[in-house]
Amino acid sequence: MHGWDGETYQTYNPRVKPESNTRPTRAAGVVVVTDGAAGNERQALSLALAMRVSPRVLRIALRAPWCWFGPGFTRGASLSILRWQWKMLSSPWPALAIGCGRHAAVITRALREASGGATFAVQILDPRVDRGHFDLIVAPRHDGLEGDNVIQTMGSLNPVDDAWLAEAKVEFSTLRQLPQPRTAVLVGGQRHGLDMDDAWFDALLARLERWRERDGGSLLITTSRRTPPAWRERLRSAFRNGTTCFWGGEADGVNPYPGYLAVADRIVVTPDSVNMLSEACATGAPVFTSLPAQVPAKLAAFHAELSGQGWLHDIHADRAVPCQPPPMREMAMVASKVWHRIEATRPDVAVALGAG
C-alpha cells in the first residue's frame, strides 16, 4: 500500500490476524497508531510521510476499561489490544510512535512507558492528560494547549500540497473537462453545540442554486460518514439543471474527493469539519462556509482565525472576495519541528530513523 507521496507503508487491521508467513519478525522504526477513523489516520500518516519515514499503520480497537478512560489509564495496556498487536509493537519497540486521537494516545503513552523511554511518542490532538506523558504533542491553537513539548498548528495536519494536487489532477483527469467555475461542495454533518438544522441546510442549498444561476459551471458534491441520510438524498437529487457530480458513499465508486480539491475554482465546506476546512484552505482556492449562530467556542475561534487570515469567507456575503493569500500549509513546518526535537533530545532515535 502506498502513501500520498509514494512512500510505502503497511496497514494492520485489528480484526484480521496476519498469516504466519507475513507477520513481521521485527517491528519497524516507525509505527502509526490509529483507531481507524479516517480523519485521525490521515493526520498521523501525513506527519509520518512528511518526515520521509516509512510507517506501519496499526489500527486498534481498545478493549474495556481502556476505551472508557482513554490515556488517563494505561495500567496493563498490553491487554487493551489484541495479543499479536502488542507483540508486534514490542519486538522490539518502535523508535517512533505517532498517534492521533484519544484511543491512540493510550498506546503511544503505553509504548513510551513500557519501553522505558526507548520509544519517542508523538501524539496529535490534545490527549487531555498531562502532556508530560508524551515526548511531543501536535495540537491546533484553538485547543489552548501550551508547553515546551507542544507544537501548535492553526488547523489539522494533511497531505495537501502542489505535488499532491498535481497527482490528484492526473488520477481524476476527467473532472478537468467539466465547465468552469467548478465549485466543490464538501458536506459533513451535525456536531455537538453547532446549530446546523434543516433551515440552515435549506439556506445553504439556496445559495448554491443562486451561484449556479449566476455563474453556470459545475458542482462537485461529496458527503462524509457523518452526513445525515436525509441531507445526502437531497443533495443527490438537487441541482438537476446543469453539470453536477455527486459522491455519497462506496456505492458511488471511488471517492473523488482529492480530484474535487485539485480542480475546484472555489470550495464550499460545511463548518463542522476542521479537517475538511484545513484541507480546502491548503489548495489555494477561495473557501466558503455558512456558520450558524450557535457555535462551540473552540470551533468559532478556528473559523475566526481562518477568516482573519483571508482563507475563509462567508458564503452568504455579497461582497467580492479580496486577494487570495498563499495556501494554508503547515505540514513541512511541523515535520521540521518534530525532527529538530528528536535530533536535539534523542540522537539515538534520530540514528535509528536514518537521520544520523
Image: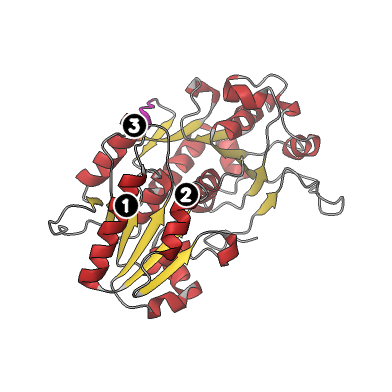
The answer to which of 72 and 272 lies nearer the viewer is 272
Q: Is residue 302 visible?
A: yes
Mark sitting earlier along the chain (2/3): 2
Q: Secondary structure at mark 1?
A: helix
Q: Residue 130, position in %: x, y?
A: 49, 20
Q: Secondary structure at mark 3?
A: loop
Q: Quadrant of residue 327?
A: bottom left
The answer to which of 333 and 207 lies nearer the viewer is 207
Outermost residue to the bottom: 177
Mark sitting earlier along the chain (1/2): 1
> Looking at the image, which residue is at 47% across and 49% down?
227
Q: Residue 27, position in %: x, y?
A: 73, 43
Dot 2 crowding, Cα within 10 Å, few <14, some 14–19, many 20+: some
Give left or right: position of 141 versus 117. left
Residue 203, magenta (yes or no)? no
Specify the quadrant that holds the N terminus: bottom right
Residue that carries the numbered disc 1 in the rendered image: 202
329 in relation to 154, above or below: below
Residue 143, magenta (yes or no)? yes
Q: Main secondary structure of the magenta part?
A: loop
Residue that carries the numbered disc 2 in the rendered image: 227
Q: Residue 258, position in %: x, y?
A: 46, 63
Q: What's under tag 2, amino acid-wise? A: Thr
Dot 1 crowding, Cα within 10 Å, few <14, some 14–19, many 20+: few
> Looking at the image, which residue is at 53% across and 27% down?
134
Q: Mark 3 against mark 1, which lies toward the viewer?
A: 1
User: Marks 2 and 3, how far apart in space?
Assistant: 19 Å
The range drawn in magenta is: 142-146
Mark sitting earlier along the chain (3/1): 1
Residue that carries the numbered disc 3 in the rendered image: 296
User: Marks 3 and 1, how far apart in space?
Assistant: 22 Å
Q: What's under tag 3, amino acid-wise? A: Pro
